[in-house]
Image (tube, grey):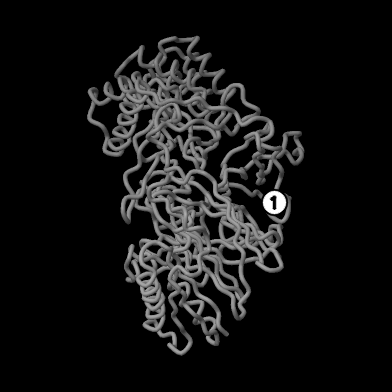
């Protein structure tokens, strides 16, 4: 028996696992001359030889023999069809299109499903109108076989969407990130800290040559720092313990504060599947030995493309594990109170096809993914999804020419929301696959996010300290970001998403906690902010201002937004059960002093009552109002008067 192969493919793209051969029509025909469209024995002989070569995957000889068959008989349809199949497999789409068109020209109805094959080829060539025409011609010619109905609809939808997208392009002017980032080989999968100063990506490095002289590559993780002139320094290999000689490491996510690194490593001895997720963190300025993220995250399948949320509580990643919706899904795992990662949940926007490379922006509400399951340009396109309440909205294609008939994936946006980064294989690049930066179209931008760069130190010795930092939403008391200051230089980095008011708390055993307030409801907060956080050792006489305890003007009832700070103070008093403290109320010098003193006393009493209501012994607590007697700033300005209107707590013994 001889097999005539006619292959139908979806647009295939670079750097992805080839999944283009969706199904193969195998048409059996015996070798009788009457069953071919040619009666010439010499043409049939060449054709049969070509089929045998094709079955042996000897494409070169198959093409020569099939071309020879056509030379013997130009109207011999079968070799044109098989040539189209071979060229499709080889991704020589221009030649495949010619071969299929030649077959159609000889007899448009000979093999109707060739219209599906040529439509898929034309989509790879971005000839969407031609592809749509061939699809519709096929539908007019015969009833679609049931297995083809969904695939036909998907191809047709893509053609309609893509043709319209090309007519309405989005602004796009990608700039190569240059030789400091890109190598002569492949560079891809970027991530970035919230201050935009550290850039991490995957690169392929040549590590030797095989026995036949071909270069051998492995994936490693690289990083670079942005200079004061906005240019990038020379990328460096992370080296050990992150990168290893025998294994591939890649597809990483640097945490927004730069303290944690999540990445993919394959075929390690401690791995649970083909590729697993690992994490590492900095101690004394050095990355520690990476750890496998364990059986809740990793399975016997493939896990990759991690991305940590800005609050550090949720890890998004891609996996082809069982229980998903498609060939690859995006999952999320929430960090538990004990520091472990919970059972992953399948994201609601996954499709029955491939969804991967999630990136959650520093605003905490904007995600970019790569998907082949939604209308696009064909294959994997980049989509933007925004949080809506407690759920997620519908994915929206970011547009052409950001998305093309080639694969696009792994896009990130910088904290200011203006620029994006992704890998592309373009003319004029440094190598096979380079990283590019471009301005995001307006409708594909996330919210502008600022950040806080702080330093924690002992207020007396000036020694830099490791401490816990929490950024709390004053409206709902939710911790929106948490980190630990560096144990060598006391530094920390926290993103400041816009549109909310925040309390910042810094705490360490043996010290009073430090608090600060950031009001960003009306201010976008895009400008970087710096903060020095001196921690005061616990001892008699030590005091601090409760910067996130609030009262309405002229009143002494605590506002709801005070609860976060008061709960922090309650925890401090519970942790230090022997301390006795005084709550001090202060006002500015405006108005009647007697009234001010009474108001300040009532406010101090309100704080005391909050603590006793939550179980702190009243014998440990004192409340005193000082009115305007102890200013800490001039009362001649609004800013000074605001500072003088405060609540403090002081250690008595």
Closest to the observer: 613 or 366?
A: 613
Q: Is residue 68 left or right of residue 158?
A: right
Image quadrant in which you'd find residue 20? top left
- Residue located at (41% from left, 85% from top): 615
Residue beneath disc 1: 243
Closest to the observer: 171 or 411?
A: 171
Q: Answer whether residue 262 is visible to the viewer in this image.
A: no
Q: Is residue 61 left or right of residue 33?
A: right
Q: Residue furthest bottom?
A: 619
Q: Is residue 277 above or below residue 614?
A: above
Image quadrant in which you'd find residue 459? bottom right
Please tell me whether mark 1 sits on a helix, a strand or a loop.
loop
Closest to the observer: 634 or 343?
A: 634
Q: Is residue 638 above or below residue 649?
A: above
Closest to the observer: 276 or 24?
A: 276
Q: Is residue 495 above or below residue 156?
A: below
The spot of residue 231 in percent (x, y) is 65, 34
* Label 1 environment density (alpha carbons within 10 Å; few <14, some 14–19, many ≥20): some
Q: Which quarter of the rendered picture does the C terminus lie within?
A: bottom right
The spot of residue 400 in percent (x, y) is 41, 27
């Amino acid at each position: 028996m001889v097999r005539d192969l006619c292959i139908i493919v979806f647009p295939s793209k670079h750097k992805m696992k080839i999944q283009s051969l969706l199904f193969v029509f195998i048409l059996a025909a015996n070798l009788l001359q009457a069953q071919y469209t040619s009666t010439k024995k010499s043409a049939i002989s060449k054709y049969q030889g070509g089929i045998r070569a094709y079955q042996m995957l000897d494409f070169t000889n198959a093409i020569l023999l099939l071309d020879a068959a056509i030379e013997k008989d130009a109207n011999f349809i079968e070799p044109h069809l098989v040539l189209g199949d071979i060229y499709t497999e080889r991704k020589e789409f221009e030649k495949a299109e010619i071969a299929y068109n030649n077959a159609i020209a000889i007899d448009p109805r000979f093999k109707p499903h060739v219209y599906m094959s040529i439509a898929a080829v034309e989509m790879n060539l971005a000839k969407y109108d031609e592809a749509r025409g061939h699809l519709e011609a096929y539908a007019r010619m015969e009833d679609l076989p049931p297995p083809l109905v969904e695939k036909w609809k998907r191809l047709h939808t893509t053609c309609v969407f893509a043709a319209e997208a090309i007519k309405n392009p989005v602004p796009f002017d990608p700039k190569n990130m240059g030789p400091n980032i890109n190598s002569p080989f492949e560079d891809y999968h970027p991530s970035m800290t919230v201050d935009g100063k550290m850039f991490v990506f995957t690169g392929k490095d040549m590590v030797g040559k095989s026995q036949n002289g071909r270069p051998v590559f492995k994936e490693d993780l690289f990083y670079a720092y942005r200079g004061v002139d906005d240019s990038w320094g020379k990328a460096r290999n992370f080296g050990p313990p992150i990168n290893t000689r025998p294994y591939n490491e890649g597809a990483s996510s640097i945490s927004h504060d730069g303290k944690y690194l999540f990445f993919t490593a394959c075929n390690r001895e401690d791995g649970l599947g083909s590729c697993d997720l690992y994490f590492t963190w900095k101690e004394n300025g050095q990355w520690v030995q990476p750890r496998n993220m364990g059986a809740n995250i990793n399975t016997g399948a493939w896990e990759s493309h991690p991305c940590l949320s800005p609050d550090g509580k949720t890890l998004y990643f891609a996996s082809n594990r069982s229980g998903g919706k498609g060939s690859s899904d995006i999952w999320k795992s929430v960090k538990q109170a004990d520091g472990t990662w919970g059972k992953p949940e399948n994201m609601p926007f996954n499709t029955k096809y491939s969804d991967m490379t999630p990136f959650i922006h520093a605003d905490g509400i904007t995600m970019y993914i790569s998907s082949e399951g939604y209308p696009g340009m064909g294959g994997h396109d980049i989509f933007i999804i925004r949080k809506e309440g407690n759920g997620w909205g519908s994915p929206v294609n970011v547009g052409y020419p950001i998305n093309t008939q080639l694969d696009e994936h792994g896009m990130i946006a910088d904290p200011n929301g203006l620029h994006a980064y992704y890998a592309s294989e373009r003319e004029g690049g440094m190598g096979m696959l380079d990283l590019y930066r471009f301005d995001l179209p307006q409708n594909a931008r996330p919210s502008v996010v600022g950040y806080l760069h702080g330093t924690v130190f002992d207020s007396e010795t000036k020694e830099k300290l490791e401490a816990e930092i929490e950024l709390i939403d004053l409206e709902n008391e939710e911790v929106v970001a948490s980190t630990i200051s560096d144990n060598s230089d006391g530094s920390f980095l926290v993103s400041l998403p816009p549109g909310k008011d925040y309390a910042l708390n810094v705490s360490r055993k043996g010290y009073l906690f430090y608090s600060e307030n950031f009001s960003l409801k009306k201010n976008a907060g895009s400008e970087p902010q710096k903060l020095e956080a001196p921690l005061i050792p616990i001892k008699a006489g030590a005091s601090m201002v409760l910067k996130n305890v609030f009262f309405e003007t002229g009143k002494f009832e605590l506002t709801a937004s005070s609860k976060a700070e008061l709960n922090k103070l309650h925890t401090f008093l519970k942790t230090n059960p022997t301390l006795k403290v005084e709550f001090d109320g202060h006002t500015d010098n405006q108005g009647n002093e007697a009234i001010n003193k009474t108001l300040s006393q009532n406010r101090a009493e309100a704080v005391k009552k909050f603590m006793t209501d939550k179980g702190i012994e009243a014998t440990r607590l004192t409340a005193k109002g000082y009115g305007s007697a102890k200013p800490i700033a001039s009362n001649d300005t609004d800013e000074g008067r605001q500072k003088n209107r405060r609540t403090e707590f002081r250690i008595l013994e």
